């Protein structure tokens, strides 16, 4: 069954795993912070952390996060 979620403004399945994932997303401080700072994903913070350590991102470059999910 599909339900509409105002938080993500999209439809999602109401399976148990979907509900658990959504609950984790709503509680996650990095998801909220990314939304406030207009980042598309929380992975932006990991990229910033890696860049601070290895200095591999050139200023004004475009970064494409292809993403992957565990499992």
Image (cartoon, grey):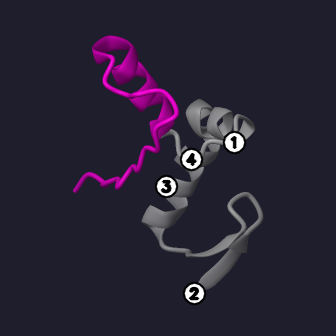
Measured as percent of width and height from the top left, residue 12 is found at 57, 74
Q: Element at badge 1?
A: loop
Any magenta on residue 65? yes
Work out whether mark 4 precedes mark 2 in sequence or the reverse, and give the earlier one: 2
User: Sequence-wise, which precedes: disc 2 or disc 1?
Assistant: 2
Q: Position of residue 67 (x, y in %)?
A: 35, 53
Q: Answer above or below: position of 61 versus 64.
A: above
Disc 1: which residue: 38
As drawn, the label of residue 25 is 4
Q: Nearer the viewer, mark 4 or mark 2?
A: 4
Q: Which residues are magenta?
A: 43-71
Q: Are marks 3 and 1 in contact (CB under 8 Å)?
A: no
Quickly name the residue at label 2. 1
Q: Residues within 10 Å of mark 4 (few under 14, many from 20)?
A: some
Label 2–label 1 contact, CB within 8 A? no
| x and y percentages locating residue 44 in the rendered image | 49, 36
Q: Nearer the viewer, residue 55 or 70?
A: 55
Give the residue at x 41% y 50%: 64
């Amino acid at each position: 069954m599909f339900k509409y979620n105002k938080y993500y403004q999209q439809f999602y399945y109401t399976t148990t795993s979907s509900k658990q994932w959504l609950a984790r997303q709503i509680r996650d401080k990095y998801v909220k912070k990314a939304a406030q700072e207009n980042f598309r994903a929380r992975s932006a913070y990991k990229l910033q952390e890696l860049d601070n350590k290895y200095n591999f991102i050139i200023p004004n470059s475009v970064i494409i996060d292809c993403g992957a999910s565990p499992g």
